[in-house]
Image: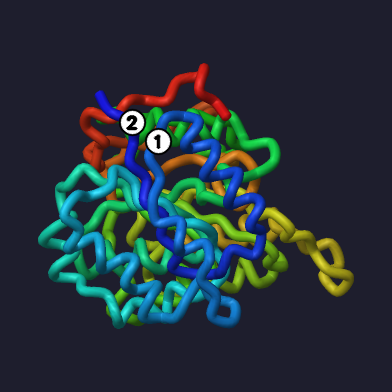
Amino acid sequence: MHPAHVRLIAPSGHAHDPAAMVRGVARLRAAGCTVDGEEVLLRFAQRFAGSDVERAADINALATAAVLPDIALTTRGGYGAARLLPRLDYPALRERLRGAPIALVGHSDFTALQLALYAKSGLCTFSGPLLADFGAEVPDAFTWHQFWATLTAPTAHVTWATSAGDVLDVHGPLWGGNLAMLCSLLGTPYFPVIDDGILFVEDVGEAPYRVERMLYQLYLSGVLGRQQALLLGSFSQCAPGHRDNGYALGDAFAQIRAVAGVALVDGLPHGHGAEQLTLPFGAPARLCVEGGSARLEFGGYPRLDGVHPVDSAENP
């Protein structure tokens, strides 16, 4: 068993909170991890963590690295990943990384890269915490433990309370991420065609009507109709405005449930809040829902073979 080797990648926004990044690196090292790539934390190009060429090179370098890291960890979200998609070497990334024990991890804007890497290279990545999340002044213990428990085991699961009334027992590929990023790539070659999937979505700072509009985009494009279920993660800072006359997120979700013909399961503890899961994008999964409880099981994703699992004593 060996400690995890973590390489930092910065495909989106610059490190606007350097103290959080320093704490995140320190906490990973305190857990025994080797961390490299810290130079990406110093790059600036307007709002981005370097030029498009530099940020794309963070990803493409994985295809030619003499030794692969165990984890390629995204520093933060923001915006900028979509600008990189035409610059990625998808055949080389597929040749080197498909089936390799490496975890590419991030969420928010990173969803654009996950969609493209799955569509063009068939790569299974992970929707999970950012370096910035590990650098929170009080990092979330659930997020930390679920991250390591998932990456170092062949299978994982999560259970949560839900208000969904449907009784479900379905299998399919698990995929999804940030709702705005999903919709931004619809109709492009970087959006994968996934049938009979289990789709999860989350977002932050979007008014309820905007959330409904994006879900309608997935519905009207036929994406929702091809899925087994839609999992609703956290939608933080999504309160109604003064013109909404009481129309809230619950109304938006009820409308989509009524028209889309797909089961909606709320309560998934994942998104832009403190509590986050580490979910393998593209891995086989099983979803069971009954009696106000949901259970999501997944396996068949890249496992960090031989990496020492971080236990509770190493919780930062």
What distance separates the C-alpha of mark 2 from that of mark 1?
5 Å
Q: Of the residues shown, which amino acid type is indicated by label 2?
A: Pro
Question: What residue is at 41 percent from the left and 68 percent from the top?
Answer: 112
In this picture, residue 49 sits left or right of residue 56: right
Q: Quadrant of residue 301?
A: top left
- In the rendered structure, find residue 41 and report the number of the disc placed on it: none
CB contact under 8 Å: marks 2 and 1: yes
Say which of 40 and 183 sits in front: 40
Q: Position of residue 310 (x, y in %)?
A: 42, 25
Quarter occupied by the C terminus: top right
- What residue would you read off at disc 2? 3
Q: Position of residue 79 (x, y in %)?
A: 54, 73
Residue 131 shows up from this direction? yes
Helix, strand or loop at disc 1? loop
Question: What residue is at 50 percent from the left and 66 percent from the top?
Answer: 109
Q: Of the residues shown, which amino acid type is indicated by label 1?
A: Cys
